[in-house]
Amino acid sequence: MKIKTITNEHRNDFSAIMECEHCWDEFKLTSGYHDNHYHTKVIPGMYCKTCGLNRAGEAKPIEVVS
C-alpha cells in the first residue's frame, strides 16, 4: 500500500487515502503516524483487502486453526 492523499494531519498523527500498487484499490486510513518506522515497516507491510498483496507482492499468510 502507498499513501495517495493525506486528508488530515495533527502533529505526527495523520489520516490518508491509501492505494494498492497492484490492483489500485483505495481505502481510508484513519490513524497513521509520521515516523521512520511507520513509513518503512508498517505501510509496506499492509495487505490489500481486495487482492491480498502487500507492497512486495507477497500474499497474506493463511492462519491455520487446529
Image: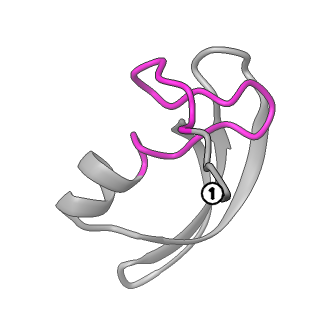
Q: Is residue 9 above or below residue 24?
A: below
Q: Is residue 27 above or below residue 61?
A: below
Magenta segment's dominant SS is loop
Image quarter where the N terminus lies is top right
- In the rendered view, does 41 fall on the left or right side of 30? left
- Residue that protrudes farthest toward the front in the picture: 66
Residue 11 placement (x, y as % from top left): 38, 85
> As shown in the figure, which amino acid type bears the numbered disc 1?
Ala
Residue 43 placement (x, y as % from top left): 43, 48
Magenta segment boundaries in residue numbering: 43-61
Residue hosting label 1: 16
Name the residue located 42 percent from the left edge and 44 percent from the top edge.
45
- In the rendered view, does 13 fall on the left or right side of 53? left
Residue 42 or residue 24, whichever sits in front: 42
Q: Is residue 52 above or below residue 38?
A: above
Name the residue located 72 percent from the left edge and 20 percent from the top edge.
24
Name the residue located 45 percent from the left edge and 27 percent from the top edge.
55
Image quarter where the C terminus lies is bottom right
